[in-house]
Image (tube, helix red, strand yellow):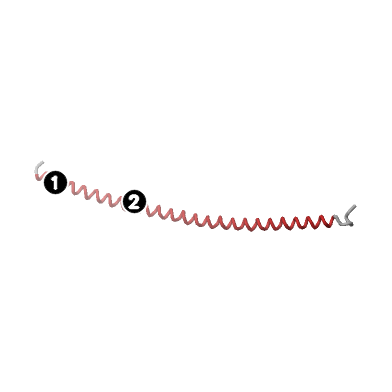
Amino acid sequence: MRRGEQEIGDEEMRIRNQAGLKNMAKEKERFEILLEEIKGKVDLVLEGHGVLDKKIEDVKDMVREVDLKVEDTGKAVKQISKTLDEHVRQPAHVV
C-alpha cells in the first residue's frame, strides 16, 4: 500500500473509531436510562412491600384483639354456665 492510500486508510479507521465511540456513548446513555427506570420500579416495589407489611401487622393486631375478646367471652360463658348450674341445683328447682 502506498503512503497516500495508507493515510486514507488511517483516516477512515479514525472516523470509524470515532463513530464507534459515539455509538458506545449512546448505548451507555441508553443503558443508564434503563437502569434509572429499573431503579424507580424497584423503589416502588419496596415501597409497596413496606405498605403491605404495615397492613399485615395491623391485621395481626386486630386478630390478637379479637382473640382476646373471644377468650374473654369464653370465660364469661363458663362463669354464666357455672352460675346457672348452681342455680338449677337449688332446692326450688329439684324435682
Kind of residue at disc 1: Ile
Can you give x and y, in whole percent of width and height, for residue 4 in the image?
Answer: 10, 45
Identify the residue at horizontal 31%, vertical 53% (top origin): 29
The numbered mark at residue 31 is 2
Q: Identify the mark nearer the N-term, 1 or 2.
A: 1
Q: Is residue 63 left or right of residue 2?
A: right
Other residues around mark 1 within 10 Å, as few (<14) / some (14–19) / many (≥20) = few
Which is nearer the eye, 35 or 91? 91
Q: Which residue has dot 1 on it?
A: 8
Other residues around mark 2 within 10 Å, as few (<14) / some (14–19) / many (≥20) = few
Can you give x and y, in whole percent of width and height, for residue 78 in the image?
Answer: 75, 55
Q: Is residue 21 left or right of residue 49?
A: left
Kind of residue at disc 2: Phe
Image quadrant in which you'd find residue 59: bottom right
Q: Is residue 52 left or right of residue 25?
A: right
Compared with residue 72, is residue 7 higher up or lower down, i.e. above or below?
Answer: above
Q: Is residue 10 left or right of residue 54?
A: left
